[in-house]
Image (cartoon, rainbow, N blue to C red):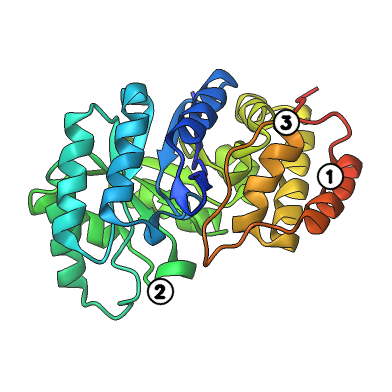
C-alpha cells in the first residue's frame, strides 16, 4: 500500500482561523480517498501560526485522530513539545517536525537534541525541507536521535531527488517510512520503493492524487502524474501558497477559506485567469478517468 497524504491548507476568514472551514475541508479530503491529513506544514502556513492557533487547528482536527499527522516543529522548543503532547493525547497517528528554521547553521549535535526532545513524546516523521529551512537533515541525524531516546519513524523528504529519498531507506532500513514531498516526482519515487507521498495538489485534485498512488505501475499512472505536475506548475505560476486556496474553489467548488498575510489571496482577476488556464489542463476537473 502506498500512503496518500495531503498537507491541508489552513483556512482563514478575517485573519482568523475558521474551524468550520478547516474541518469541512479535511472531511472532504478523507472522503475523496486520502489516507492521512498532514496539518500545519508549510502548505498549511504552519510556521506563521501562533501556539494558540496551532492548538486550535489540532483541537479542530482531533476527531480524525489516527488519520492525523501534526507538524509541531517551531523556533520555540517548549511549545513544540507541548503541542506534541497534545497531539499524542488527542490520538494523532504521528507528529512531524521541521528543523528550527531561520537558524540554518545550528550544529548537528544541537539538531539531534531538538529532534530527540520532540520525538521522545510521540512517533515522529522528520519534515525535511531544505529550501525553506536551510538545513538538509541527514540519515545520520535520525540515527543519533533514535539512539538517544527519540523515535523518528519516517521522513517527508521535500527534495526533488529520488536517490536522496532512497538514502533514508538504505541507511535506516526498509521499515523506515519515506514519503515524497514534491508533486512532480511522485511517480518515480513510488517506483523506487518509497511508502507514499505528501502532495499539496491533493488539496484540490484529491481523487487524481489518490488514483496516481493506486495506478503508479500502469500507463494510467503516467497520465495521472502529468495531470498532477501540470496543475502544480499552474499553482506555482500564480504563487503556490495563495493559489492552493483558489484552486480548491475552482476545482472542487467549495470555499476552504483564504490564506493570511504575509501570504495574500489571489485577486479575483488572477483567480479567474487561473481558472481559464485550468480548464485547458483539467477539462474533466478532479476526475482520474
Please, is residue 262 above or below residue 270 in the view? below
Point 74% across, 55% down: residue: 233
Marker disc for residue 253: 3
**Of marks 2 and 3, the one in the foreground:** 3
Q: Which residue is mark 2?
A: 134
> Do we see residue 207 in this rendering?
yes
Q: Which residue is mark 1?
A: 278
Residue 139 % position (x, y): 30, 57
Q: Earlier in the sequence, mark 2 or mark 3?
A: 2
Residue 173 % position (x, y): 31, 42
**Of marks 2 and 1, the one in the foreground:** 1
Real-space Cα separation, disc 3 to disc 1, in angstroms? 13 Å
**Near-viewer residue (60 or 164):** 60
Please, is residue 147 above or below residue 253 in the view? below
> SS for tag 3?
loop
Q: Earlier in the sequence, mark 2 or mark 1?
A: 2
Q: Tell whether 273 sits left or right of 268.
A: right
Give neighbour class at mark 1: few <14, some 14-19, many 20+ (Cα, 10 Å): some
Toward the front, the furthest residue is 14
> SS for tag 2?
loop
Real-space Cα separation, disc 2 to disc 3, in angstroms? 37 Å
Residue 183 % position (x, y): 62, 48
> SS for tag 1?
helix
Q: Earlier in the sequence, mark 3 or mark 1?
A: 3
Toward the bottom, the furthest residue is 105
Point 56% across, 63% down: residue: 263
Point 84% across, 45% down: residue: 278
Amino acid at each position: 500500500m502506498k500512503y496518500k497524504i495531503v498537507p491541508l491548507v489552513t483556512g482563514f476568514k478575517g485573519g482568523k482561523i475558521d474551524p468550520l472551514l478547516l474541518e469541512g475541508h479535511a472531511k472532504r479530503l478523507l472522503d475523496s480517498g486520502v489516507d492521512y491529513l498532514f496539518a500545519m506544514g508549510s502548505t498549511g502556513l504552519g510556521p506563521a501560526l501562533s501556539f494558540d492557533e496551532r492548538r486550535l487547528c489540532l483541537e479542530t482536527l482531533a476527531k480524525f485522530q489516527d488519520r492525523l499527522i501534526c507538524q509541531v516543529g517551531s523556533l520555540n522548543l517548549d511549545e513544540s513539545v507541548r503541542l506534541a503532547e497534545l497531539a499524542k493525547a488527542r490520538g494523532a497517528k504521528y507528529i512531524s517536525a521541521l528543523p528550527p528554521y531561520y537558524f540554518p547553521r545550528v550544529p548537528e549535535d544541537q539538531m539531534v537534541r531538538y529532534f530527540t526532545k520532540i520525538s521522545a513524546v510521540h512517533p515522529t516523521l522528520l519534515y525535511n525541507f531544505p529550501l525553506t529551512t536551510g538545513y538538509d537533515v541527514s540519515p545520520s541525524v535520525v540515527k543519533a536521535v533514535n539512539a538517544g531516546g527519540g523515535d523518528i519513524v519516517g521522513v517527508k523528504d521535500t527534495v526533488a531527488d529520488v536517490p536522496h529519498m532512497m538514502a533514508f531507506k538504505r541507511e535506516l532500513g526498509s521499515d523506515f517510512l519515506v514519503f515524497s514531498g514534491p508533486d512532480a516526482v511522485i511517480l518515480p519515487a513510488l517506483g523506487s520503493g518509497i511508502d507514499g507521498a505528501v502532495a499539496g495538489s491533493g488539496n484540490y485534485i484529491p481523487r487524481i492524487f489518490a488514483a496516481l498512488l493506486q495506478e503508479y505501475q500502469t500507463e494510467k499512472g503516467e497520465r495521472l502524474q502529468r495531470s498532477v505536475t501540470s496543475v502544480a506548475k499552474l499553482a506555482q505560476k500564480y504563487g503556490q501558497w495563495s493559489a492552493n486556496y483558489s484552486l480548491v474553489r475552482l476545482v472542487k467548488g467549495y470555499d476552504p477559506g483564504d490564506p493570511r498575510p504575509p501570504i495574500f489571496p489571489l485577486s479575483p482577476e488572477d483567480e479567474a485567469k487561473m481558472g481559464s488556464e485550468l480548464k485547458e489542463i483539467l477539462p474533466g476537473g478532479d476526475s482520474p478517468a
